[in-house]
Image: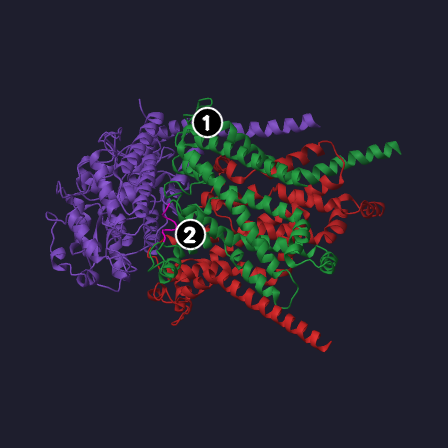
Amino acid sequence: MDKKNSSMGRNNILKKVLFYCGNFIIGIIFVSPLLWMVCASLKPEAEIFANMNSIRTFIPTHASLNNYIEVFTRLNILNVLKNTFLYIALILIGDLFLNSLCGYALAKFDFKGKGLVLNLVIALMVLPMEAIMLPLYIEMSQLNWVNTLQALVIPFIPKCFSIYMFRQFFSDVPDELLEAASIDGSGRIRTFFSIVMPISKTVYATVFILDFVAHWNDFMWPFLVMTGEGKRTIQLAVQVFFGTQPVHYSAIMAALVISAIPMILMFIFMQKYYVEGIASSGIKG
Amino acid sequence: MKKNLMTVLAALMAVSLTACGGASANTTASSAAASETSAGAASSSAASSSDAAKLTIWSPTDKESVENWWTEKIGEWNAANPDIQVTREAIDRSDSYAYDNKVATAVTSSSLPDIFFVDGPQVSYYAANGIIVPLDDYFTADDLKDFVPSTVAQCTYDGKIYAMSATESSVAFYYNKDMLREAGVDVDDLDSRTVDNPITWSEMRDIAEKCTTADHVGTHIIMDHGEGLPYALEPMYISNGKDYINDSGDTAEGYVNSDEAVKTSAFLAQLIADGYANIEPITDEFLNKACATMLGGSWDVSVLSENADFDWGVTYYPVSDATKKAVSPCGDWSAAISKDCKDTAAAGKFLQWLMNTDNVATYAAAIAKPATRNSSYETEAMAEYKNYPLSLMVEQLNNTASPRPRTPSYASFSTKYAEAMTNIFSAAASDHKVDEAYIKEQLDSVAADFTEDYNTYYAK
Amino acid sequence: MVKSKAIKKQSESVAAAAFVGPAFVLLIAFLLVPMIYTVYFSVFRYQIMRPNDITFINIENYVKLFKDPDFWHAFRNTLYFTIVVVPVQSALALALALLVASKTRGVAFFRTMYFAPQLTSMVVISILWTILYNSNPSTGLINSLLTSLGMESINFLSNPRTAMNSIIFMSAWQGAGYQMMIFIAGLQAIPSSHYEAASVDGANSFQKLIYITLPGLKSTIKYVIMITMIQAMKLFTQPYVMTKGGPQNATKTLVYYIYTEGFQEGNFGYACSAAAVFFVIVVTMSLVMKRLTTAKE
């Protein structure tokens, strides 16, 4: 009896060791390109491409923050971050507000043309932005929006995917709850804001996260419509920096690291919602 | 309800349709208006500053010294000319085509600025499409005598001046003296070359071969997949006997795909096939000591003098062994007046001022490029151009510079040529040998695409 | 009662208009109208610099498009990328999810590691890997590793045979963390009683994976494949930053083709015809995918 227990214990320990060691080794290999990026950003330029065939390439022996200082002097990174957060925030506000209203009406109201709207939303869900970017670009220039915040924000507020997610979620909200509110004399709009919204935090968090990540990665559209200096978004700024003389690889690495920091912070502080958001998108969809 | 929705849809469509259609109607109207105002501008220019002419300029975003130059100069102009108030907008160039996209959008919406900067070879494209207007009234033949001939040539289309540039560019052969000495190359010989006695292709190849080691390659060929390729390599083709496109700018057939052009491309591809040049050079490869020599731009002089921690030199653009004909690249961003400009007289006046000897000199100094005006070199701002290595660039500009093809189909040509050369180089790199039949095939398709673009939009 | 229902219905229509209206108008203006315009302009000869010279040319653009070998390159490359990256990335994501699905102490740390590439952007990753993939062993980390192991260096991005695969490898690495999170949620939703019952029946881990895990993940897998596929069809950033569609067209994708034709060369009408075809392809692929996954059920 005792013997069996101890062997099982040993087995468990072995399993644990395997689990931790295995994951650790795979994990290190997995993140090694990123580790190299961080190390290179701390090295002087001359050392980046030295010792590449040994493990020493991952050790910044003369680590300093000089490269970061160079990025800050050559690139107005604070302004770039401000631009990026501003436009994403505006999109998110519009998206969460308007699309959830739309999704709610599609889930709970009975009105003429509902089928049409719903079908349109579903049909347009597969429409890739890339297929319409040419006329959309012309539309922007006709509205005189090129190089303005509007061009980055307004076309991206309507999102079929968000509407659909909201509709799916709100469909599960029990009608009794809404009826009770209506008996209390609460209007539809008040019911929505005071009853429905507070119990729907998950779906809002999901849409928020998915949208934030998608727009943080935006490259092509800002690249087309935002050409003025001082209006660059983070991805554009990094791309421009990569191609601006003098090219110092160490400074480029520092710029890459800086551009990742906001997302890392967001992940650390919102990890729970972040993971839930990504995960629930899979279950709901 | 269904019907209602359709009406709404139709209304929305109609609104945006008229917006699209309206744009083209507006264009004609505004260009007519523009010619009217330019006639009446002289009489009304004495008006008070409240209804002063307002000019907007677009030019590419540049480094701090250039941005400061603009701020200072525009401040100066606006203070001295209350009747013509100028503002400048800096436009990003995140890739070689982003700026043109921006102009294209403005064309569609008729919202071009009064003056905008155009890259040299694009002048023909904009001129042929009526986007920019002739400047002959503002730059007389006499004025033009002071400008280097290559600038005037590049800015001329169909016999008229369409743009004017303050700066020029050139490309020459840079070498890392430390690496060359180590490889046993006669550095003193290279240092002593003159414009009449430049190195030849075979000498360039020799040096590249000797200097290729495990740590670095012998030379560097520009690999920007964009305008850099046709720009930096064109002299090779001309020196070997055939340019990309004929002089009247309507034929590529028999030029870019001629035997001479195939041989030229093969020479370059061979450098890659032999491993003397990298197919994927890191950016600023020469500065980063990953190559021993390079065909580099005049702008690299300042980059290297500020940043290089090794001994380097520069000599003239190499010539073909067959002809020994010295040719060098040139061309830079030039200012042009757009068709949407309401007051061309004011814009012309401003351009005259912008391109005066002192402004050209200080601008060129700020942007670290050679000036276009000979008189500018006499000013203090351009003093360093009297000495090597910058004097070499000026020498090339005055003696060997040849502008890029003047054709309205240049944009299409440039993209296709860059793509073909990238293909040729990558084939050479992966096969370790050069296949002339493949080169011919690639260049044939460049010629065919050029012909198609030209015939679709410009042939009469 | 009947009357009140009618009133209710009427007021509901008013409310619906207020709720649906704003999003709907924006949807029409910025999705539907541009889409219709894509099709509309695709039958015109329209050089972007010549807005006064727009000529109706019927289906000429389409004829030219289907004759253009570059378009077919782009088409094949897009298809190839999609067909390879979807299973590779999904399988990698599933494997990672299985590694870290358990609720052991410290597992969050490993999850974060696998998720880390997601915390940077595609542009950043593309720039980084352009440097890592560099063909010269003295400047490219991966090639320096290969040569020190006694292998030959590879021109990852400049050889047409390896360029697209290099982009696929990188993209799968970057994207897997995201799908991993979805799979973890899917795995946790499978009742543990199923596994316990299987253990009692003496099933080994592999059998459990085949008979319990995979069937339990069916809807998750379908979802993951669908989103990965739609994402993959739109490939642009990686070739734009890393290869400019080259070498020898090996990484030119449909979106890249639309971009160069429309924006770089100004063949606006022609590019619209390519965009319209692209849209049809995406819709067809989605429908085929949907049919395939529902047929399996």
Point out residue A77 in the picture as x, y percentages from the top left corner.
45, 58
Q: Colour of chain A?
A: red
To which residue does mark 2 refer?
A239
Left or right: residue B116 compared with residue A264: left
Q: Nearer the viewer, mark 2 or mark 1?
A: 1
Left or right: where B300 falls relative to C216:
left
The stretch in magenta equals C154-159
Tell me the crowding category of disc 2: few under 14, some 14 to 19, or many 20 or more residues within 10 angstroms, Cα based: many
From the viewer's perspective, is residue B423 above or below residue C119?
above
Dot 1 surroundings within 10 Å: few (below 14), some, or many (20 or more)? Answer: some
Type of residue at label 2?
Gln
Question: Which color was chain B given?
Answer: purple
Q: Which chain does the residue under circle 2 lie in?
A: A
| Quadrant of residue B81 within the rendered picture | top left
Q: Nearer the viewer, residue C3 or A262?
A: A262
Instruction: Please report the residue visible at 52 percent of the width from the left and 62 percent of the height from the top.
Output: A26
Q: Measured along the vertical axis of the image, is residue C28 above or below residue C128?
A: above
Q: Does A106 sit above or below residue B209? A: above
* Quadrant of the frame with the C terminus of chain B: top left
